[in-house]
Image (tube, rainbow, N blue to C red):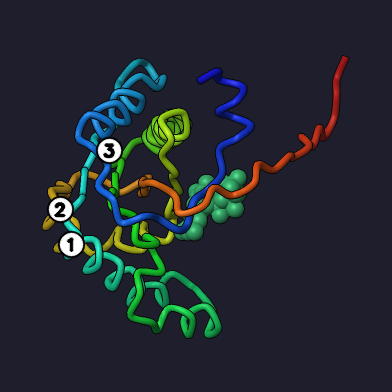
Amino acid sequence: METEKAILGRRSVRDYVDKKVPDDAVRQLLSAGAMAPSAMDAQPCRFIVITNRDKINELSDKVKARLGAFGFGARMLERMKVKEDVIFYGAPLLIFIVADEGDWAPIDCALAAQNMMLRAYGMGLGSCFIGFATALRDDRDTLRSIGIKDSQKLYCPLIFGYPKKWPEPKSREPTVQKTVD
Ligand SMILES: Cc1cc2nc3c(=O)[nH]c(=O)nc-3n(C[C@H](O)[C@H](O)[C@H](O)COP(=O)(O)O)c2cc1C
């Protein structure tokens, strides 16, 4: 897919078909992440790949339980009191991008994340960045249970899968604050 088409067409997907993402597609997503630029070519990103439905549901419940400490208001917390997976939207694939803490690490991970979301779109897969899931960042037991080391920080939780319906592409105008010629 052309880069322009991917950039203009990608939208966050929040409703997924119950269908596994094939291993080869997962590998292609990971390669897209690995190909992102990183400060001093340090390549700090590590990828935690989660496809186990019970684990995804468990993580979703843990995120819901922690959103209060994350500073969310009463209305949002009320909306989270449901059995459904309103955090990861039933996606069949979670990829958490983690790295040892460092000045550039969040930027390096975010660049990898965008590469992966664009690559996903090019492959017919939906995606969404799930910032809510960073509410797990101080829950070291849970992070350890999915292979995240104590020296690492959870920067970019992502979901992928086949969309039930594609959101309409959206246009956005850049806000140029000032042009200095
Ligand atoms: C850092 C970051 C955190 C986000 N966290 C969430 C989230 O927790 N849940 C969610 O449904 N969407 C989340 N999103 C998706 C945004 O809501 C979405 O990108 C935005 O509304 C623009 O829509 P688009 O991606 O379809 O263009 C997040 C996006 C970013 C970049």
Check disc 1 and report the residue beneath it. 55
- Reply above or below: 73 against 162: below
Element assignment for label 2: loop
User: Image quarter for residue 21?
Assistant: top left
Q: Position of residue 54 (x, y in %)?
A: 17, 65
Residue for badge 2? 146
**At x 30% / y 49%, what residue is drawn?**
154
Q: Position of residue 109 (x, y in %)?
A: 38, 35
| Amino acid at the residue labelled 1 | Lys
Circle 1 — which element? Answer: helix
Image quadrant containing the C terminus: top right
178 sits left or right of 83 in the view: right
Pointer 1 local density, CA inside 10 Å: few below 14, some 14–19, many at least 20:
few
Q: Is mark 1 within 8 Å of ligand 1?
A: no
Q: Residues within 10 Å of mark 2 (few under 14, many from 20)?
A: some
Residue at image position (21%, 43%) is 48
| Residue 100 in sight here | no
